[in-house]
Image (cartoon, rainbow, N blue to C red):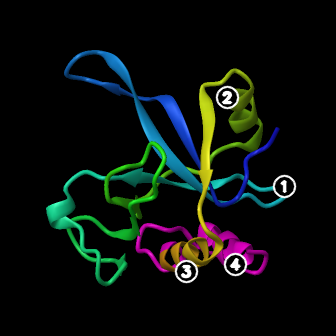
Amino acid sequence: MSAGMGWIYKDDTFYLDQSDGVLKAKYLLVLAALPRHDLVVRLLTSRHPELRPEHPACFHGDPYPGFYLGVLGGPLTARSWLDLRFLDDFDPKEFDRKLQIERLREVMPLPAALLRSALLCAASADDTTVQQERRLRDALTIV
């Protein structure tokens, strides 16, 4: 198994909720999964829709830079955005291990046209590192 570029995954134990001590789930999108590199990943969110624009879809302003994905269907029934704030890259071996133990599960692929737009938007985000930007732009050549 290995991470699929353009796939949305659900991590059932992504973060610890400090208010109740319970591990909580998050959905994430693999933006770039290139050989011999860490995975460039960003979280999906539906929180604070009143502060996240739908138009333009690619928004780099405050308080929440993001890319509007729409209502994707399946388990993602709310309006969703790709959160463009910084997220550490994922080690592909660790990602695969989490897939094997079913801590991570494939949810759905993002349509190619939407993925291309998300890649362009994420590559230009303020919190995207120079290395990540290179990998995102390289990923654009194979979408």
Disc 3 to disc 4, C-alpha distance: 8 Å
Q: Which residue is mark 2?
A: 98
The amino acid at mark 4 is: Leu
Res. 120 mark: 3
Label 2 crowd (10 A; few <14 / some 14-19 / many >=20): some
Please state which amino acid type lies under the numbered disc 1: Arg
The answer to whether residue 22 is above or below residue 1 is: above
Image x and y of residue 27, in percent: 47, 44
Q: Provide residue 55's location: percent of width, then percent of height.
A: 29, 82
Q: Nearer the viewer, mark 1 or mark 3?
A: 3
Mark 2 to mark 3: distance in Å?
28 Å
- Furthest-bottom residue in this view: 56
Quick check: is 111 in the magenta stretch?
no
Residues at marks 2 and 1, CA–CA distance in whole angstroms: 19 Å
> From the viewer's perspective, is 81 left or right of 91?
left
- Mark closer to the chain start, 1 or 3: 1
Q: Which residue is mark 1?
A: 36
Mark 3 and mark 1 in contact (Cβ < 8 Å)? no
Tag in front: 2 or 1 = 2
Amino acid at the residue labelled 2: Lys
Please, is residue 47 above or below residue 15 in the view? below
The magenta-colored residue range is 122-143
